[in-house]
Image (spheres, grey):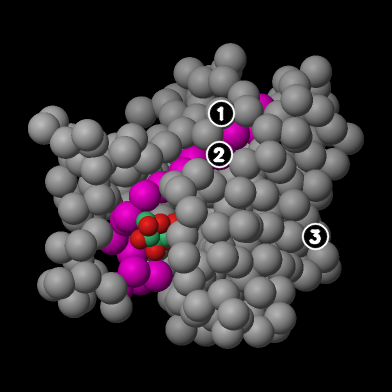
Amino acid sequence: MYPDLEGKTVLITGAGTGIGQAMARRFGQEKANVVINYFSDQENPDDTIVDIQKNGGQAVKIKGDVSKEEDVQAMIDKAVDTFGSLDVMINNAGIENEVPSTEMTLDNWNKVMSTNLTGMFLGCRDALKYMTDHGIEGSIINMSSVHQQIPWPHFVHYAASKGGAKLLTETLALEYAPKKIRVNSIAPGAIDTPINAEKFDDPALKKGVIELIPIGYIGKPEEVAACAVWLASKEASYVTGLTLYVDGGMTKYPGFQAGKG
Ligand code: BGC
């Protein structure tokens, strides 16, 4: 537990499902005020809100598209109007779809880039503006991916967006360190979330993914959330510009296990 997170206001984009939802719940356990951004009517943040309240946190939801300036501003306003501040911004919303690069439409490319990278930029920009205007020594966490490092055929838009997330995070970390605002990213590997459901429901595909994970299993959203609360807390006060890989070793060349290479 991280007592300094109690009463802090945390805005998490894409928190209707998956890793975002797990982070919302975990910040609730830390008794934070959580603003849950979600995108589609199929998502139901109400259960998450109840869980957070049961654990002593507070929560509100706001629907919105991170690629739209006015929606991102509305999320920040919601945090400030409801809880009086914004201390932690987590840019988590992301999408992906598989398509060979020569068949990728411009629309498909733009959609992924505008959610994953432009949405991240807007969230950072507006949160940093609020924090600097109000002298808040806050924390920003960008959800990247192992694919900021590992090339991923058929996902060139996604890999490019995550490669962009790396230097976006590092650049803003450098730019805002003098204001004591920390900007870090978390790069998950294969995690058991709805984005991967189709793949992991197929035993052969799932086995193929597990072979790429030295630690031997698909990660749980809670294992990512555990890193997010640490990174947001005072315990990580001297950490900025970091990409924290939460990937069971996936980025550490699993092909080179003992006896190989
Ligand atoms: C993607 C997953 C994928 C994992 C490892 C993540 O960024 O969202 O779909 O399984 O990377 O390749």
Residue 63, compared with residue 10, is above or below; it is below
Front one among 106 and 130: 106
Mark toward the start of the polypeptide (3 vs 1): 3
CA separation, marks 2 and 1?
6 Å
Residue identified by numbered label 2: 185
Q: Position of residue 70 (x, y in %)?
A: 82, 68
Alpha-carbon span between mark 3 and mark 2: 21 Å
The reply, left or right, for residue 67 in relation to residue 44 is right
Of labels 3 and 2, earlier in sequence is 3
Q: Nearer the viewer, residue 64 or 68?
A: 68
Q: Is ligand 1 closer than 8 angstroms to the Cβ of mark 3?
A: no
Q: Image quarter for residue 239?
A: top right
Does residue 142 appear anywhere in the picture?
Answer: yes
The amino acid on which the numbered mark 2 sits, given as a three-letter code, is Ser
Placement of the N terminus among the 4 image quadrants:
top left
Estimate the spatial distance between the alpha carbons at disc 3 and disc 1, rounded to whole Å: 26 Å
| Disc 1 crowd, CA 10 A, few/some/many (<14, 14-19, 20+) | some
> What residue does disc 3 label?
73
**Relative horizontal placement of residue 124, taking residue 139 as reference (left or right):** right
Where is ligand 1, by quadrant? bottom left
Crowding at label 3, few (<14), some or many (≥20) Cα neighbours within 10 Å? some
Residue at the farthest top position: 238
| Residue 182 placement: quadrant | top right
Specify whether residue 186 is painted magenta.
Answer: yes
Q: Residue at x 81, y 28 (%)?
A: 175
Q: Is residue 91 magenta?
A: no
Magenta-drawn segment: 182-197
Amino acid type at circle 3 is Gln
Whether tag 2 and tag 1 are in contact, CB under 8 A, the answer is yes
